[in-house]
Image (cartoon, helix red, strand yellow):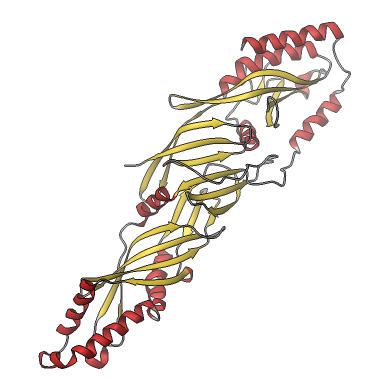
């Protein structure tokens, strides 16, 4: 902080030596203010990303699944023997797996029972297209009948014998010694039905009701999102996010994620624009008095931006409009940003600030005021909670930031999820 004050005093001394003011008019400074307000986003994306390790993603899905009602259908090919058996299918679990970009692979385990007895299971593979729900900021993963790609029965010898015994008991006692071979052939045909033609019945009767009743969700950061793109990495599911903010610099490519928590990457330009949104909402002070204290009617107005390079964090400050009394000022302060976990908050500080640009006649006043703003006001106003609460299905989760790192190209945080 002392270094910043020294920088401000040095700047003021230079002003006294070389004279004050550059003759910039209020009209020109109003134009500079309008240019900032009219800034547009660059073409590069994404603006942020969320990485969920596969084990954690599947845990979230499992907690949402709940108890599923079984669906029953008759097994064909046995009626000529006078045997009628019905198989019930119950969705036991859903697991997310790697798929091509833009898709999520899904393997659903379906338990199969006949007359209440376990006779095997089915691995149903699907390829689903997730979609962004902008109202809730969640990535929705619907499982629909049309997403089914294949069914693979899993029946061991004990389960096959159990099915055989169930079918035998359906035959008249006198016919059992003569019909065993025919019954075995019919049961083999029933297994083929499950693996081939039967999957159509499973798709329409098992997965179709599920698709109407259940859509899985993964929470996303509280950002003004425009679109979400999904990529499968070997370590987990990556969701790349574009916002509606005028972000000028995108994230570099993410190739892996580690740990057991949710990783969140935010482009520094995105973070700066989120501060501006908070200022517009009144959540962070945006106007200040000459003394440097926040005041909704203060003569100085502030916004922030990120510019890669030395001291990338930029605070733009204007003294313009009715409050200026004819002495308009536009200044930019540059500094380094640092984020630290302190108790239940993330404390964001800007250090090593220097005045990068000043336009207007009252430069001496601007230099003194800006130095105070940088050291006393801005550094202490940027505190955010390190925990958030959200709900998925019937389960309430608490996400708590466990690590945070500010880099030149990305701000990276890892969130640990806690639930009852």
Examine the rendering and report whether any part of residue 290 can be seen.
no
The quadrant holding residue 402 is top left
The location of residue 62, given as percent across then percent down, is: 36, 54
Q: Is residue 254 left or right of residue 312?
A: left
The quadrant holding residue 286 is top right
The residue depicted at 39 percent of the width and 42 percent of the height is 397
The location of residue 180, given as percent across then percent down, is: 18, 88
| Pick the front one: 404 or 245 | 404
The quarter of the image holding the C terminus is top left
Q: Is residue 169 left or right of residue 343?
A: left
Residue sticking out furthest to the right? 23
Q: Is residue 179 above or below residue 104?
A: below
Q: Is residue 205 left or right of residue 414?
A: left
Q: Is residue 319 above or below residue 56?
A: above
Q: Is residue 129 above or below residue 371?
A: below
The location of residue 392, given as percent across then percent down, is: 41, 49
The quadrant holding residue 30 is top right
The location of residue 17, given as percent across then percent down, is: 84, 6
Q: Is residue 186 left or right of residue 301?
A: left
The quarter of the image holding the N terminus is top right
The residue depicted at 47 percent of the width and 37 percent of the height is 414
Examine the rendering and report whether any part of residue 126 can be seen.
yes
- The mark tally for this picture is 0
The residue depicted at 80 percent of the width and 9 percent of the height is 14
| Pick the front one: 368 or 200 | 200
Q: Is residue 57 above or below residue 297?
A: below
């Amino acid at each position: 902080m002392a270094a910043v004050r020294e920088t401000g005093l040095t700047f003021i001394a230079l002003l006294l030596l070389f004279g004050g003011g550059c003759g910039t008019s209020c009209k020109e400074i109003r134009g500079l203010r309008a240019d900032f307000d009219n800034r547009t986003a660059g073409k590069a994306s994404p603006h942020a990303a969320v990485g969920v390790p596969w084990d954690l993603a599947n845990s979230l899905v499992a907690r949402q699944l709940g108890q599923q009602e079984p669906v029953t259908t008759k097994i064909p090919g046995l009626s000529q023997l006078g045997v009628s058996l019905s198989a019930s299918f119950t969705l036991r679990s859903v697991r997310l797996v790697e798929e091509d970009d833009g898709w999520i692979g899904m393997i659903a385990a379906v338990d199969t029972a006949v007359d209440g007895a376990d006779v095997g299971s089915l691995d149903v593979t699907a390829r689903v297209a997730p979609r962004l729900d902008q109202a809730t900021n969640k990535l929705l993963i619907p499982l629909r009948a049309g997403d089914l790609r294949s069914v693979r029965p899993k029946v061991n010898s004990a389960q096959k014998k159990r099915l055989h015994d169930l079918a035998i008991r359906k035959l008249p006692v006198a016919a059992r010694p003569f019909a065993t071979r025919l019954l075995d052939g019919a049961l083999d045909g029933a297994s083929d039905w499950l693996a081939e033609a039967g999957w159509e019945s499973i798709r329409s009767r098992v997965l179709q009701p599920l698709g109407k009743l259940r859509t899985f969700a993964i929470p996303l950061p509280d950002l003004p999102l425009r679109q979400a793109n999904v990529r499968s990495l070997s370590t987990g599911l990556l969701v790349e996010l574009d916002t509606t903010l005028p972000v000028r610099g995108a994230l570099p490519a993410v190739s892996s994620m580690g740990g057991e928590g949710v990783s969140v990457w935010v482009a520094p330009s995105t973070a700066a624009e989120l501060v501006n949104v908070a200022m517009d909402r009144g959540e962070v002070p945006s106007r200040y008095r000459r003394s440097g204290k926040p005041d909704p009617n203060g003569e100085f107005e502030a916004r922030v931006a990120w510019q890669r390079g030395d001291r990338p964090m930029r605070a733009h400050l204007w003294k313009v409009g009715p409050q200026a009394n004819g002495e308009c000022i536009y200044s930019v302060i540059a500094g380094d940003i640092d984020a630290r976990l302190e108790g239940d908050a993330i404390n964001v500080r800007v250090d090593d600030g220097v005045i990068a640009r000043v336009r207007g006649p009252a430069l001496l006043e601007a230099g003194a005021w800006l130095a105070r703003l940088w050291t006393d006001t801005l550094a202490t106003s940027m505190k955010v909670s390190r925990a958030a609460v959200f709900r998925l299905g019937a389960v309430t989760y608490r996400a708590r930031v466990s690590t945070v790192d500010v880099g030149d190209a990305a701000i990276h945080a890892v969130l640990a999820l806690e639930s009852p």
